Image (tube, grey):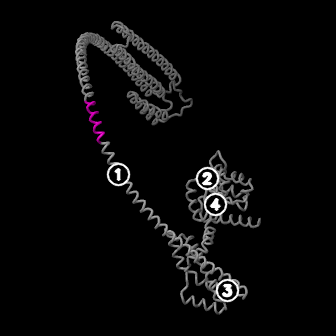
């Protein structure tokens, strides 16, 4: 029950009237069973007039009606459960899964369930009446206590309102109880009758179905016996037909075999006669072909012998020409070497080194883009005459300058990738531009090739990277710069290759997946060998590893390049480390 305030604030007449209006609204909402709005109006009345005793009576009424609504809800929930149980029993009786009970036994079970349900409803009704009696006694005690407490301070208007409300509450309660009990009894009677009708209809339908089922089974058995007799007769007829058919087929097969034997014998005689004729014709044809083939082979042998003789004569003539040409080139080469030797001796004896340097510088300028024009050649000759340089010395210097300028032009064309698809035609064109004869080219061919290789090949790079993109990006660039490139996926795999590769530069990622060597650990492993202690080593560093590498004590022949890799920075770092390596080798020598 609600507890009244011990020190109530004395309300004004206006607030008391407003509180009474709130109580009237609360009574209206309670009739509509809207407990939320009823409680809101009751709370407003309590704020306006906390000394009004009807407020606390209303709180008890709200509690009582809420309990009644809760019981109604529980009864509504329980009834479908009982109805479901009855329907489940009917379904079991119809499907034959009730353990083989008779209809009389099923009716007795349903009667027992119905009695249990009525007993449960009666018990609930007793509990409800006891609760109502208890609530009425408590309300009576509370009203008497309030009367004793309030005394003569109540005004006649409030007593009248209170009596009206109490009378209305009692009437409403009796009316709701009577309606609830009548509705419950009517619902139970209707439910009981409906269940009995459903059960009786289900039992009758079950009996009817059983009768129809037995009739259908007897008909089915008669039909089955009749069909089996017909099938047996048809099978016997089919077997007799099959037996006759097999006998006829055996006879036909014997006749066919006899005919085939006779036909095969006659065919073999004909085939033997035809075979003899074909053999005789083939033997005659073969003898004729052999005679023709023998004659043809003799003719071909004579022609081949004649052809070989002619080719041998032509080859001998060509060899004689080559020998004569080589002899001529050898003579020219010998003459040129003698002239060059005489020119150098003459330069030394006559002390013409400075004059020759001056003439050589002028010739180099004139021969930069190929053979100079005629007027430029005359001016060069005039310079040689003015410097008192003999003609044979002038020719020797001009020959050296021409070959040197030609060698530079070839190197420049190759370095700039200006060679055409047919590189021999390009070199031939350059030879014509510089008027280099075949003998002069052959004389200096080995020197040209050695110079080209020395300029183009810079060494071997061992590239160790887990990234396919890094290897695909760096490999072609390194090769175009003159390096041979050997790739490796991990440092562990690189240790197996490094002895065979003998690299001049090592490019290695700073980090690799767990389970193997890291880049720094790989560096320490190869530095333990004196053979690879001074090989330039460059890390391809991830951004997170740059700080660690900067704090590491890297040697002068060690360094790193940050990813993503800048090609110009990498090229500069490689050249720097290679230069340091060459200086170290020179200092050792």
The residue where tag 3 is placed is: 356
The disc label shown at residue 379, or none: none
Circles 4 and 1 in contact, beta carbons < 8 Å: no
Q: CA distance from mark 4 to mark 1?
A: 68 Å
Helix, strand or loop under label 3: helix
Q: Quadrant of residue 119?
A: top left
The residue where tag 2 is placed is: 488
The residue where tag 1 is placed is: 289
Circles 2 and 3 in contact, beta carbons < 8 Å: no
Instruction: Estimate how packed mark 3 is, as few (under 14), some (14 to 19) or many (20 or more) residues with alpha carbons within 10 Å.
Output: some
- Of 367 and 141, which appears nearest the observer? 367
Q: Quadrant of residue 391?
A: bottom right
Mark with earlier residue (4, 1)? 1
Q: CA distance from mark 1 to mark 2?
A: 68 Å
> Does the segment drawn in magenta span residue 271?
yes
Helix, strand or loop under label 4: strand
Q: Which residues are magenta?
A: 263-277
- Of 324 and 65, which appears nearest the observer? 324
Mark with earlier residue (1, 3)? 1
Mark with earlier residue (3, 4)? 3
Query: Quadrant where the C terminus lies?
Result: bottom right
- Of badges 4 and 2, nearer the viewer stands 4
């Amino acid at each position: 029950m609600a507890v009244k305030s011990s020190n109530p604030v004395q309300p004004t007449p206006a607030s008391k009237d407003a509180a009474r209006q709130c109580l009237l609204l609360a009574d209206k909402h309670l009739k509509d069973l809207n407990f939320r709005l009823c409680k809101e109006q009751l709370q407003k009345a309590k704020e306006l007039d906390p000394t009004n005793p009807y407020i606390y009576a209303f709180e008890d009424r709200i509690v009582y009606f809420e309990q009644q609504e809760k019981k109604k809800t529980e009864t509504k929930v329980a009834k479908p459960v009982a109805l479901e149980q009855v329907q489940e029993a009917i379904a079991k009786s119809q499907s034959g899964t009730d353990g083989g009970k008779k209809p009389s036994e099923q009716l007795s079970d349903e009667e027992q369930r119905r009695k249990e349900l009525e007993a449960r409803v009666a018990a609930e009704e007793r509990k409800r009446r006891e609760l109502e009696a208890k609530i009425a006694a408590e309300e009576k005690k509370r009203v008497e206590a309030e009367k004793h407490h309030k005394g003569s301070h109540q005004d006649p208007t409030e007593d009248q309102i209170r009596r009206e409300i109490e009378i209305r509450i009692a009437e409403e309660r009796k009316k709701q109880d009577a309606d609830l009990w009548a509705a419950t009894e009517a619902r139970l009677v209707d439910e009981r009758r409906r269940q009995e009708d459903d059960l009786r209809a289900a039992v009758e339908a079950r009996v009817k179905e059983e009768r129809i089922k037995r009739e259908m089974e007897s008909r089915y058995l008669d039909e089955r016996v009749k069909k089996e007799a017909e099938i047996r007769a048809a099978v016997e007829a089919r077997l007799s037909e099959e037996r006759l058919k097999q006998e006829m087929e055996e006879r036909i097969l014997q006749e066919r075999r006899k005919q085939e034997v006779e036909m095969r014998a006659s065919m073999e005689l004909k085939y033997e006669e035809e075979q003899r004729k074909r053999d005789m014709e083939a033997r005659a044809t073969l003898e004729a072909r052999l005679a023709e083939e023998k004659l043809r082979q003799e003719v071909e042998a004579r022609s081949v012998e004649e052809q070989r003789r002619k080719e041998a004569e032509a080859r001998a003539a060509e060899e004689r020409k080559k020998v004569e040409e080589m002899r001529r080139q050898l003579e020219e080469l010998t003459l040129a070497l003698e002239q060059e030797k005489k020119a150098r001796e003459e330069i030394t004896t006559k002390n013409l080194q400075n004059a020759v340097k001056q003439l050589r510088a002028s010739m180099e300028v004139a021969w930069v883009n190929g053979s100079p024009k005629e007027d430029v050649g005359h001016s060069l000759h005039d310079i040689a005459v003015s410097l008192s340089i003999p003609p044979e010395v002038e020719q020797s210097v001009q020959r050296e300058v021409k070959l040197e300028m030609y060698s530079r032009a070839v190197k420049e064309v190759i370095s700039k990738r200006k060679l055409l698809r047919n590189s021999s035609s390009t070199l031939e064109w350059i030879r014509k531009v510089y008027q280099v004869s075949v003998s002069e080219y052959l004389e200096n061919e080995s020197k040209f090739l050695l110079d080209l290789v020395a300029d183009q090949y810079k060494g071997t790079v061992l590239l160790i990277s887990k990234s396919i993109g890094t290897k695909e990006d760096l490999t072609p660039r390194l090769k175009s710069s003159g390096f041979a490139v050997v790739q490796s996926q991990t440092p562990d795999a690189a240790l197996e290759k490094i002895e065979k590769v003998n690299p001049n530069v090592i490019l290695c990622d700073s980090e690799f997946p767990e389970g193997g060597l890291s880049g720094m650990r790989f560096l320490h492993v190869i530095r333990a060998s004196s053979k690879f202690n001074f090989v330039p080593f460059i890390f391809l560093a991830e951004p997170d590893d740059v700080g660690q590498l900067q704090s590491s004590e890297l040697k002068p022949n060690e360094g790193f390049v940050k990813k993503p890799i800048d090609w110009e920075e990498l090229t500069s770092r490689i050249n720097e480390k290679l230069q340091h390596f060459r200086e170290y080798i020179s200092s050792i020598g």
